[in-house]
Image (cartoon, rainbow, N blue to C red):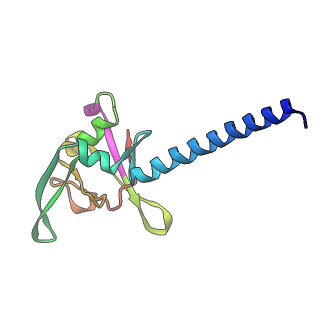
Amino acid sequence: MSRREFVISVIALLLLATGIASSLYLHSQQINKGDFITVGNEKIFMDDIFKKCRIISVEVNDKGVLKNYTGALLSDIINMSRVKNPEEHKYTVAGPGKEGGLYQKTVEWEDMMNGILTEDKRTIFPDLPRAFWIKDVIKIEVI
């Protein structure tokens, strides 16, 4: 192998190693970012939600017992995802259902303005029946 071929091979290996290292770094950053939910077509990370959104407590009647829940306002989460004219849409909140399907409920913007997402990814809508509370939220679709 000539000196020129050796130098080209070394440069090619360095470029390949740089590409692999940067790919691994970006992948590790995504993993370190933590859990997320999908809102529309955008991933919103849970740690960003609880840093950037207003956190409130709501008191609700949960099966005859008054309970307090604390979480991020769902309307703030929608605004983080840059939905245009959010008040003109409905929202389908989805989580895991039975037999691998999805359990989902559709709500109005007014409900999103009063609803919260807890740190354990549960929606609480104080003005709606408990059937609208979704556990382990995976996504919020904008309709």
- Rendering coords of residue 124 (x, y %): 22, 56
* On-image quarter of the N terminus: top right
Magenta residues, start to end = 86-93
Q: Is residue 28 left or right of residue 135?
A: right
Q: What residue do we see at 22% from left, 49% from top?
A: 72
In the image, residue 87 lies in the stretch drawn in magenta: yes
- Rendering coords of residue 40 (x, y %): 41, 40
Q: Is residue 140 visible?
A: yes
Farthest residue to the front: give it.
3
Quarter-wise, where is residue 94 in the image? bottom left
Does 119 appear above or below 67?
Answer: above
Does 60 appear above or below 113?
Answer: below
- Rendering coords of residue 37 (x, y %): 38, 50
In the image, residue 136 lies in the stretch drawn in magenta: no
* On-image quarter of the C terminus: top left
Does 64 appear above or below 87?
Answer: below
Q: What residue do we see at 17% from left, 44% from top?
A: 54
Q: What residue do we see at 27% from left, 61% from top?
A: 131
The front one of 65 and 24 is 24
Q: What residue do we see at 48% from left, 61% from top?
A: 101
- Rendering coords of residue 99 (x, y %): 49, 68
Farthest residue to the bottom: give it.
64
How many marks are shown on the rendered structure?
A: 0
Quarter-wise, where is residue 2 in the image? top right
Farthest residue to the right: give it.
1
Q: Is residue 109 left or right of residue 35?
A: left
The front one of 89 and 81 is 81
The front one of 3 and 43 is 3
Q: Is residue 106 visible?
A: no
